[in-house]
Amino acid sequence: MGLRGKLIRKCRARSPWILLFDTGACNACDIEVAACLTPRYDVERFGTLLRGSPRHADILVVTGPVTRQARDRLIRIYEQMPEPKFVVAAGTCATSGGAYWGCYNTYPGLDSVIPVHAYVSGCPVKPEAVLKALSILVEKIEKGEV
Amino acid sequence: MDEKEILQKIVERFGEKVLDAKVIGARRITVRVPPEAYKEVVSYVAHDLGLSFLSCLSGIDRGENLEVVAHIGYSICVLVRTSIPKDKPEIESITDVLPAASIYEREAHDLLGIVFKGHPNLKRIFLPEDWPKGVYPLRKDYAPSHPKPLRGGGGE
Amino acid sequence: MSFEVPIGPQHPIHVEPLMLRLKVDGELIVDVDVDVSYLHRGIEKGLEVRTYLQGLYLAERICGICNCAHSLCYCLNVEQLLGKEAPPRAKYLRVIVEELSRMHSHLLWLGHYFHTLGFETLFMYFWRDRERVMDMLELITGNRVTTAYNTIGGVRRDITPEAESKLRKALDYLEERMRYYDKVIDSEPTILARTQGVGLLKPEDAIKLGTVGPHLRASGVKHDVRLDDPYSGHDEIPFNVVTWDTCDCYGRVKVRMGEVRECISMIRYALDHLPSGDYRLKIPPFFKAPEGESLSRVEAPRGELVHYSISNGGTNPYRYKVRTPTLANILSVTYMLKSRGDYEVYIADVPPILGGIDPCICCTARVVITDEARKKRRILTLSDLERYSQEKGARRR
């Protein structure tokens, strides 16, 4: 498994396909993550593609505090993703509930609903921070640390 | 027409049905009417005075009563308000006068429990499907709290 | 035979949840039902448990794209309650940042709209030019999105001469790019075929359904809050209200392109005539607002935004109501998506028509398709629908 495992992890780390899901965000984090696709930040040079279906994705990037209505859909998407799967909580709202403390319809953070592997803080996140988080996660995937 | 003229016209037309009417700022008028006269006054302001645009419809919890406020007008905004008792919060819908009200009345019904008689489609619009019936978040007796977490948190 | 079409939540570019139940006969849409519930966060109640200054930071996050409009509307509302007015320099600075924010929102929408029609290159071009606007916002306010520039009593930072000269250069660049895009849009036959005659909304219907913003102005109705209810020095700054009389998606594109040009000229005027003096009133962070009510309206990029608050003399608002422009435009979507007589609407037209109102609903869009004859349900994602729309664009070319 040693050499084969290393090879598989290396290939996996070279083309992490991501799925972006908004669980009730104000959209600021979504447009900043989407700005990563544009020519200035260009996340595609790392082999990352934005996919439309959970069955094709390795990494789930979630923005927004999870609202009650979005919770079931989020769990269903998480279950549809094939293993191994990784979750990135983008933004302060996904990390801890953010600005929405005291609001009756939001959960206090993404990790109260599904397990999370990386947290990117910022309100909203900067595209550079998202790129950095993805590159650290991908390095850990290659080394087998997650 | 400026705000004072509009106020005068409403007061002249409806006489004692107007419980309170005043100018509260530049281009802002508020008119308080009893629930029976609410639809008539809204119709007069929208059609006869020509301020045909419904900007918004708000619901407010005033303790013993619930208040419904219709904001009408592009430039000068006329706030037509009425109070209804909390134990029987029913009022006539204004969707046949101003079709734009259909979505705002659904919101007031969902979050405050006001029943609009004659509304074509008074269904839930904002709250999730599993929200308990009879609990209205914008009422003053509701204390907001986060839903219970599904797992411990702290990441893997 | 009729189907109901559901749109699923994962949308790669611009996720805004909205539940649409379309009844379709083959490819033709015959009936529509709208459900807006995925994004409800309980903000109005949240504002009641916060002080006025704390509430400013929540109000700004009602929508990240129109954050400037929300924070401006909130500040105007609280200033009206307190009976104060921002100094003249603050008013002009607010206009500069507000118009920059309008430009970024329109460029974002234009890029996304052409992406749904199948033009990836135009999408990349618009978002690349939008980065210049984001740089200017970052230079003046300190952040790209969620600028936190407006505060109760004025603005938080002054503009430096260096920022001013960079801003002027960026405006010249953007003006030249907008001329190029105008030529491209008017000369590309596929764009004209996919937008002209699609999503018709007559002016009398638009007013009846409570439509606001560029969507309303594309139907020829000259209504703009900056003209009808001026709020921050707009009675001194000259500008044209851009309208178009074709009442279709093409008109919506042209109105927004025209508004970007108007933003450029308004910012230039504000920079040339910037009053001197303070940019902020001294207001303590904790205060009790006097009893009363106040209604403030602002022309957000998507339309008229209304904030209505009632104070009972405490440190927190008693009731704070927000009416966003997209809620006002939802009814017109139901109206425009129904086929009537000669006016035919196909499933592939859903993204351009829905996109035409520039939805900022921040919820998961879901559309359910049910086949009544065969008693089956099909669920399509928004990316499936967009693929239909893009394939239709490719077939035309």
Image: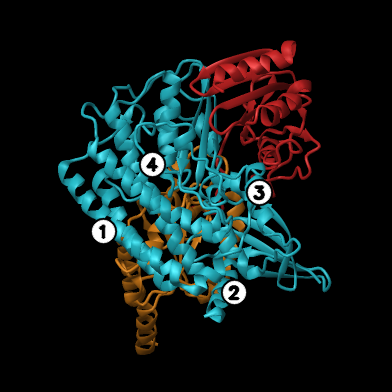
Chain colours: A orange, B red, C cyan
Q: CA distance from mark 3 to mark 1?
A: 38 Å
- With respect to residue C213, does C54 lie above or below? above
Q: Secondary structure at mark 3?
A: helix
In the image, what residue type sits under mark 2? Tyr
Measured along the vertical axis of the image, is residue C168 above or below residue B25?
below
**Which residue in the protein does label 4 denote?**
C239
- State which chain disc 1 sits on: C
Check disc 4: other Cα within 10 Å, few if <14, some if 14-19, many if 20+.
some
SS at mark 1? Answer: helix
Chain for mark 4? C
**Which type of secondary structure does the marked residue at label 4 adopt?**
loop
Label 1 to label 2: alpha-carbon separation: 35 Å
Nearest to the eye among marks 3 and 1: give it.
1
Q: Nearer the viewer, residue A61 or A144?
A: A61
Label 1 sits on what residue type? Tyr
> In the rendering, at what x and y percent does residue C293 appear?
53, 21
Residue at image position (63%, 53%) is: C201
In 3D space, how far apart are the residues under numbered discs 3 and 2 (Cα atoms)? Answer: 24 Å
- Chain holding disc 3: C
Return the disc, 2 or 4, that comes first in the chain's sequence.
Answer: 4
Image x and y of residue B31, in percent: 64, 19
Q: Are marks 1 and 2 in contact (CB under 8 Å)?
A: no
Q: Nearer the viewer, mark 4 or mark 1?
A: 4
Q: Residue furthest top?
A: B16
Q: In this rendering, would B118 be left or right of A35?
A: right
Instruction: Name the residue tied to disc 2.
Output: C388
Place residue C395 in its image quadrant.
bottom right
Going from N to C along the chain, the mark reached first, 4 or 1, is: 1
Q: Nearer the viewer, residue C112 or C56?
A: C112
Say yes or no: labels 1 and 2 on the same chain: yes
Pointer 3: what residue?
A: C331
Q: Amino acid at mark 4?
A: Phe
